[in-house]
Amino acid sequence: MTTRPAKVDTGMGVSCIVSTVIHLAVFLLLLWWGKLFPVNMVVQETYYVDVVNLPVANPRAGSPTQKGNETEIAPPPPVAPVSAMNLPEKPKPSAKTAAKPDPRVAQSAAESSEAALAERVAKLERGLEARREDAVMERLRSKLKSAGSGKSGMPAASGTEQGSDYTAYIQSRLKDAFRDTISYSTKNPEMIVRLFIDSGGKLSRRISERSSGDRAFELAVLRAIDMASEKFTPPPDKKQFEGVFVFKPQGITTNRGK
Amino acid sequence: MALLLGAGLIVKIVLLILIGFSVVSWTIIMFKFIQVQRANSESVRFMDFFWKSKRFDAIASQVDRFANSPLTVLFNEGYGELKKVVEGDGASEGSALSTDLGGIENVSRALRRATNSEITRLEKYLTFLATTGSTSPFIGLFGTVWGIMNAFEGIGRTGSASLAVVAPGIAEALVATAIGLVAAIPAVMAYNHFQHKIRVLINEMDSFSTEFLNIVQRNITGK
């Protein structure tokens, strides 16, 4: 009995090499593509609104209006002319009455003293009224002056009014940046950092008051501070700001006591 | 690319397995494509030549031209068995022809054996494509589940469910499923394609076997 020689399939090795080359080519293509067209994350401007500590808006600022619709501020109401008070004339003592003390004269003197008293009370009341009007007018003038450049629709708060909190603002910026950079390798690391921001809103110094001992966490904190400090606004009253912030994986808290 | 490099150890292992599956399945796809294409084209040419030729010995001398066709294997087997039958009959009874069907049965068995052998050869490695097609998505899914478990662990550690914490882990995890699908989809498509082509070749082999037996029966036994 003759046996048929088994057919040998050739070409498997060549196919294997070609397949490997194709996979490598695809891998390199992906690398090249990633370098050629890096993924650009759209960074949108983030607006921070501190709901609790909103800056106090000037009531004269009005409601928001579109640009170009600015209306001129109405001129202040004309100041009411304050007429000079008519001072009561002093009673002129007559020579006769002085020379001759007479019961009639005495009676008329009593009457005149009552009239003088009434005049005096009236004078005081008028003076008081005039002062009150002056005060009201002064208040109106100062309010008109503080209405700013006349652009209605923008709160005229400068951050110095009661209610604005620069520390909360810095904390929220740090928190936002820290969310992007957070990384740690130990359990519950904690780092305390003191930040100094100059009058221009630039981070002048940062001092690590307590280290976490976690290298990855500390790098994440420093990166977050650097990222956040790019967009700090100047502190209120152009004073240097100093604040202590406690960084934890759960978030950032302020240490106002220190 | 950073997603691949930044993935965890288990996810990386899963990715390597899937890439291995993909490389091997593409090797098989290319090899089978060439094999089946050659088998098809040479079978067509061989059948033309077979019907044009009048003698088996003339065909037998030319079959090397169609080495990749499974029909040539069938012809060689059938012709070899036929020669043995004829030679055996001649030696035992002194006649060139056998009137009983015992010799035809032998040729038929030889053809069936050759057909089975060719089917096995043609279907070789296809099981790997089927395995890749059916298991790669699940392997990828395993990597994804593992990655998402890690992502949730990260959420638990930080106490924050923000996208910054959750998204990278999930993105890394989903890469495993994506590569699993990339490996599986071509494998399944190629498996179905080759199955169809091989079924056509099997039908051709069956037809050829029947025709060969008919010719043998007509010409040799005179029926």
Image (spheres, rainbow, N blue to C red):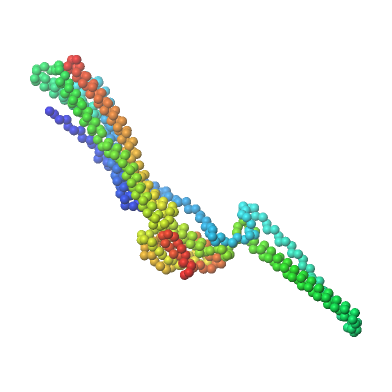
Q: Residue at x 17, y 16 (%)?
A: B221
Q: Is A120 positioned to the left or the right of A28 in the image?
A: right
Q: Residue at x 51, y 61 (%)?
A: A169
Residue B162 pos. (x, y %): 44, 54
Tell me if I can see residue B60 in this picture.
no
Residue B98 pos. (x, y %): 14, 18
Residue B107 pos. (x, y %): 17, 23
Q: Tell me which corner region of the image, top left, top right, bottom left or bottom right, holds residue A145.
A: bottom right
Which residue ends up furthest to the bottom in the rendered image?
Answer: A99
In the image, residue B116 sits, relative to residue B167, either above or below, namely: above
Q: Is B38 positioned to the left or the right of B88 in the image?
A: right
Q: Residue at x 68, y 57 (%)?
A: A72
Q: Residue at x 33, y 36 (%)?
A: B189
Image quadrant containing the C terminus of chain B: top left
In the image, residue B51 sits, relative to residue A24, either above or below, namely: above
Q: Count numbered badges in the picture.
A: 0
Tell me if I can see residue B77 in this picture.
yes
